[in-house]
Image (spheres, rainbow, N blue to C red):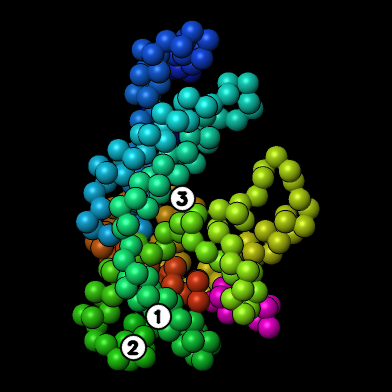
Amino acid sequence: MFRSSTKTDKQELWERYKKHKDLSAREGLIVEYVALVKYVAGRLAISLPPNVQQDDLVSCGIFGLVDAIEKFDLERNIKFETYAISRIRGAIWDGLRAMDWVPYSIRQKARELEQTYSKLEHQLGRSATDDEICEALNIDKHQFSQLLRETSFTSFVSLEDMWTSDKNGGNPIRVMDTVEDRNTPDPVSMVIFEERKRLLGEAIKKLPERERLVIALYYYEGLTLKEIGKVLEVSESRVSQMHTKAVLRLRGRLSRIKKKILD
């Protein structure tokens, strides 16, 4: 996915830095892996408002890359790219939280839109059309498009967000506190994970064809918005709208399933 110098050259840089603390080697490693930062920033851009510049994301991501280089253990049996991407993404999230990038009013609109999709599609037994959503919200097509643009970046999950562990909204916990320790395999968690994956797969299959294709190309094939636009012969903004609608439908369907389980 990322082209740079040979494996031998990079290994030499790693050894010079880790064994001898050669700062020029660290700079070399940053240059070697900066494409990772640009990749992660580009992938996150779909979930962010237009006022957030990709250069700002890259700047935040660089801190994550440097942190990853500092803490990476050459003796561990994992690829640096795998380790670094999570660090880079986390650094960008931290930067976004500091920017206070999602106003409360926008989150409220996103929740209302998600609930509308969930309720209407449950009643219809199928995917709701744009016209049906507009009628339910008592808005026109232009207002609906504006609403999708405003809420498109709320499909981004913060590790500081609060979830509740029962149907009455009690016992709130942070998303961060639900992240598993990968060094301690849990058979029960694996079963739950597989079931969630199955339910998500079924929900994706029920999406309208083009929205399902956007999800597949973005999350499974790793294409950018621009690349997906070329495949579908539509603009990047149109791809972003389809992605937003798909995420809202999925959230709505999965939230109904969760509610049935709690009830």
Q: CA distance from mark 3 to mark 2?
A: 34 Å
How far apart marks 1 and 3 lie (CA) works out to: 31 Å
Residue 89: image location, x then y, percent? 43, 44
Residue marked by disc 3:
221
Horizontally, is 176 left or right of 226 in the view?
A: right
Q: Residues within 10 Å of mark 3 (few under 14, many from 20)?
A: few
**Measured from the top left, where is residue 38 in percent x and y?**
33, 39
Disc assigned to residue 11:
none
Query: Mark 2 near mark 1, Cβ–Cβ under 8 Å?
Result: yes
Disc 2 crowd rating (10 Å Cα; few below 14, some 14-19, many 20+) is some
Q: Name the spot of residue 173 as percent of width and height, x first.
A: 59, 62
Tell me the residue at 24%/86% (across/down): 140
Q: From the viewer's perspective, is residue 125 above or below residue 157?
A: below
Q: Position of residue 171 (x, y in %)?
A: 63, 69
Which residue corresponds to mark 1? Answer: 112
The image quadrant of residue 218 is: bottom left
User: Residue flagged by tag 1: what amino acid is it?
Assistant: Glu
Q: Nearer the viewer, mark 1 or mark 3?
A: 1
Q: Nearer the viewer, residue 214 or 140?
A: 140
Q: Secondary structure at mark 2?
A: helix
Q: Dominant secondary structure of the magenta stretch? A: helix
Residue occupied by mark 2: 137
Quick check: is 232 in the magenta stretch? no
SS at circle 3: loop
- Going from the N terminus, do you reach mark 3 or mark 2 first? 2
* Callout 2 amino acid: Leu
Front label number (2 vs 1): 1
